[in-house]
């Protein structure tokens, strides 16, 4: 049994909040990486990461009642992943064959949010909050410093242009808060660009030069792809002139609209001829609006954006677009609502008082999610994510389970995808572009309706379809 196989063993009972506080205090007393703000996001150091694992294992053993054997197994499995990560990054370990594309993903977890903990615990089982009382503060500080690495692979196809890797880009939402808390601070913006540039360059060179990926899917990278000028800055690096980057936004928009169509055709939810869009003035929101007008007959779009003036100008292009005064109005008046915003919408806010979501479904495009699932369901509504499914003959968009015993990595049991063949639309976009060698269809600017049509054609040719309705790693049943 390997270390990663052993990592699935669970404790007899979950740890307590008191133990979590004690573990955090134990480590904070050490100072250094456990308290530094901002952390050093560009220091990829194997020995330091292994030392942090040692620190956490000792703190758990001293401050909790966790079983010593369980601690050791999780500690060894976490060491295995750290060493594998650096071996990949330093060229000491290979996947076994070159890949045609890389789907580049950041970490969604933050130091103050437990919601996405399960995205990293398959690789760092020692940092499991339930088994070992490791808080998000501790977990993230333990993970900072992991290099760009391979989280999983796509090698089921024997066609070289259909192979891929899921590549971790060590960027974090915390980076923005730590380095650029004030968007008006130009000096902080320059520091953020410098840090992000180092991380993105290292990641792109790893994926392209080390793994052989011709196509890089940047859709999941935080912050917005404009930090690389939609990939152009990566192409300018020596040896990277043949690199192809794509934002993933064409696949995302197509899958949003396809999800709406599936709801209309396969459920009893009554649209009443109206599709709601929150965030309609943004790139994703506006492209979704235009694509929905083309792909869904007999419906108008009821849309809201805080940039109301911009939205009204865009809405003037079609009589089928109606502008809502607030997000709450969209939620009240539409039964199928697309959320295309990156911020959080708190249904506990006064503007949503008395809101009834019975008979309604929200399609949340954001990662991390814009809407809280429990808040939506408490008001009688349903929440689904934008997820596609690989129905291709050669399963070339289905992950292998490189580190997870042959079970495809799912981005977290309660924070990711449901179903072995499920994948985010932005990752599927990179896959179909590489498979068809359709490099001219790569999206290197704000997504346009033509981009959506072109990626949609590649999806249909490749057997990519909407996955079973789901959110947070669980199936969602719609009436």
Image (cartoon, helix red, strand yellow):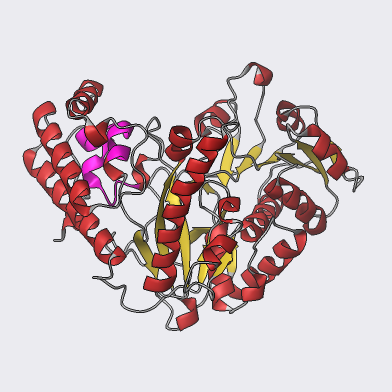
Start and end of the magenta stretch?
120-141
Percent coordinates x, y for residue 97 in the rendering: 35, 79
241 relative to 41, above or below: below
Question: Residue drawn at (26%, 60%), measured in percent from left and top?
Answer: 86
Percent coordinates x, y for residue 249 in the rendering: 63, 56
Residue, far front: 187
Tell whether 251 sits left or right of 129: right
Residue 391: tell me if it is visible. no
Decide whether residue 127 is among the magenta residues: yes
Residue 101: tell me if it is visible. yes
**Foreground: 264 or 431?**
431
Tell whether 208 sits left or right of 318: left
Quadrant where the C terminus lies? top right
Question: Residue drawn at (30%, 32%), measured in percent from left and top?
Answer: 36
Percent coordinates x, y for residue 452 in the rendering: 71, 62
Question: Residue drawn at (83%, 47%), measured in percent from left and top?
Answer: 299
Decide whether residue 391 is among the magenta residues: no
């Amino acid at each position: 049994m390997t270390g990663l196989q052993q990592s699935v063993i669970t404790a007899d009972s979950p740890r307590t909040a008191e133990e979590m506080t004690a573990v955090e205090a134990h480590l904070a007393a050490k100072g250094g990486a456990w308290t530094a703000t901002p952390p050093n996001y560009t220091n990829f150091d194997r020995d330091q990461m292994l030392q942090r694992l040692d620190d956490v294992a000792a703190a758990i053993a001293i401050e909790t009642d966790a079983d010593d054997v369980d601690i050791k197994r999780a500690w060894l499995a976490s060491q295995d992943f750290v060493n594998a990560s650096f071996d990949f990054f330093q060229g000491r370990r290979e996947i076994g064959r070159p890949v045609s594309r890389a789907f580049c993903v950041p970490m969604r977890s933050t130091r103050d949010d437990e919601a996405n903990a399960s995205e990293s615990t398959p690789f760092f089982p020692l940092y499991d909050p339930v088994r070992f009382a490791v808080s998000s503060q501790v977990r993230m500080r333990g993970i900072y410093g992991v290099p760009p690495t391979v989280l999983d692979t796509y090698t089921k196809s024997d066609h070289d242009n259909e192979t891929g890797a899921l590549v971790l880009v060590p960027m974090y939402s915390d980076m923005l808060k730590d380095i650029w808390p004030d968007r008006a601070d130009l000096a902080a913006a320059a520091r953020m660009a410098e840090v992000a540039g180092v991380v993105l360059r290292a990641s792109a060179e790893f994926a392209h030069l080390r793994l052989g990926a011709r196509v890089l899917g940047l859709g999941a990278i935080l912050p917005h792809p404009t930090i690389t000028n939609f990939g152009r800055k990566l192409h300018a690096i020596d040896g990277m002139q043949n690199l192809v980057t794509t934002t993933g936004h064409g696949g995302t928009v197509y899958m949003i609209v396809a999800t709406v169509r599936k709801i209309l055709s396969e459920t009893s939810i009554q649209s009443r001829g109206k599709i709601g869009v929150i965030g309609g003035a943004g790139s994703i929101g506006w492209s979704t609006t235009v694509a929905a007008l083309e792909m869904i007959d007999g419906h108008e779009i009821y849309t809201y954006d805080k940039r109301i003036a911009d939205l009204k100008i865009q809405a003037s292009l079609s009589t089928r677009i109606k502008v809502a005064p607030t997000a709450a109005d969209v939620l009240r008046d539409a039964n199928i609502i697309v959320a295309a915003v990156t911020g959080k919408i708190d249904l506990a806010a006064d503007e949503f008082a008395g809101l009834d979501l019975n008979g309604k479904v929200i399609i949340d495009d954001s990662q991390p999610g814009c809407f809280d699932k429990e808040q939506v369901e408490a008001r009688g509504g349903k929440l689904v994510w934008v997820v596609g499914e690989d129905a291709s003959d050669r399963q070339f968009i289905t992950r292998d389970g490189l580190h997870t015993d042959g079970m495809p990595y799912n981005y977290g049991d309660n924070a990711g995808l449901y179903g072995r063949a499920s994948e985010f639309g932005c990752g599927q976009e990179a896959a179909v572009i590489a498979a068809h060698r359709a490099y001219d269809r790569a999206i290197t600017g704000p997504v346009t309706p033509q981009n959506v049509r072109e990626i949609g054609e590649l999806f249909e040719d490749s057997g990519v379809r909407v996955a079973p309705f789901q959110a947070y790693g669980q199936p969602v049943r719609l009436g």
